[in-house]
Every structure is written in structure tokens, then in C-alpha cells.
Image (spheres, rainbow, N blue to C red):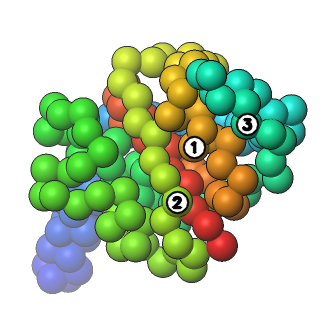
Amino acid sequence: MRSILFIFILIYSLQACELADVNKADVKSIDKKKLLDLVNNLRKKGCNCGSTYMPPADKLEWNDEIERAATAHSIDMNENDYFSHTSLDGSSFADRIKGTAYEGSPGGENIAKGYANEEEVFNAWKNSEGHCKNMMNGKFTDIAVGRSGNYWTMNFGIK
């Protein structure tokens, strides 16, 4: 009976540690549909990214594996107080996507800091020439976004 009680306490303690890690990471939920709709509506119409006209492009699909890479990068930037496409360990967005079970190739990455919601961060990316070009890139087929605190990461893949 004591061993069963010990196992229960051990399992409960481990679960509490996992929850503490998630809370520490300050992972924020994302309205995936809203972000996907915002990007796909932009792609459907075409737009000017800075001085470059980007023609309409096919819809992107949300990919959970790419989301894992995006969320991990947002957590890392938030927990370690930096803002860069290159992780502190030297890994790139391509390395992070390749580290998942994603079956395609890495495409690109947008990062942002300080935005409170999906519309704000989308508009910031749309109004930045390089980020906008990523969202409009017709070669990209998959997308996902991860957020931790006010750090946002948008990753793209190609299948």
C-alpha cells in the first residue's frame, strides 16, 4: 500500500512540475483559424509588400509540426530574453522545423515581439516588406504560429 501511495505522490509531483514549466513559458493560446484566415485572405487578393507587388497565391494549410517548432522558438526567446531568428544554441528556423516530424521542407520564418493579439501581429508582418513577402510566397504550402508572452513566431513549410 505504501508503494502505491508513493507512486501516486511521485506521479502527482511530476505532473505539477510539467504544469509549472508550461506556466513559466507563458505559452499563450492562439486563434489558429483567425491567423490562417488573415493570411489566406491576403494571399487570395495579392498585395503590395513594400514596393513589390505580390500576386495572389494558393491557400496555406495549418501544420501542427511546424507549430511545435514555432512555439518552441517563441518560448526560447521569451525565457532567455532575446529576439532573433537564430536561437542561442545557433539553430536556425530550418533546423527547428527539421527537428520535428514535418514531412516537407522548411520555408521561412517571421518573428515579432510586443503584440497583444492576432490582428496586431498580422498587421505588423503585413506592413513589413520581408515578412509580407514570406506570407505571400507562392512556394509555401504550410504555416503555423507559436506564441509565448509577447513573442510570436510564424513558420512556413513547403510540401
Q: Which of the 4 image quadrants contains residue 122?
A: top right
On the question of residue 30 being in view, the answer is yes
Residue 59's x, y, as percent?
Answer: 80, 51
Q: Amino acid at mark 1?
A: Asn
Q: Which residue has dot 2 on it? A: 107
Label disc, if present, on residue 134 of the rendered structure: 1
Q: CA distance from mark 2 to mark 1?
A: 9 Å
Name the N-terminal-most of marks 3 and 2. 3
Is the Cβ of the residue at disc 2 closer than 8 Å to that at disc 1?
A: yes
Circle 3 SS class: strand
Few, some or many residues within 10 Å of mark 2 (<14, 14–19, 20+):
many
The quadrant of the image that shows the N terminus is bottom left
Q: Amino acid at mark 3?
A: Met
Q: CA distance from mark 1 to mark 3?
A: 10 Å
Q: CA distance from mark 3 to mark 2?
A: 17 Å
Q: Which of the 4 image quadrants contains residue 48?
A: top right
Q: Please give left or right for residue 3 compared with residue 42 in the image.
A: left
Q: Which residue has dot 3 on it? A: 54
Residue 90 against residue 147 in the figure, above or below: below
Residue 15 against residue 84 in the figure, above or below: below
Q: Amino acid at mark 2?
A: Gly
Task: Please tell me which residue is depicted at 38% across the width and 64% down the height of the picture.
Answer: 94
Residue 138's x, y, as percent?
Answer: 72, 53
Task: Please tell me which residue is depicted at 68% across the width and 42% down the height of the picture.
Answer: 136
Residue 27 against residue 58 in the figure, above or below: above
Circle 1 SS class: helix
Name the N-terminal-most of marks 2 and 1. 2
Residue 92's x, y, as percent?
Answer: 29, 58
Is the Cβ of the residue at disc 3 closer than 8 Å to that at disc 2?
A: no
The quadrant of the image that shows the C terminus is bottom right
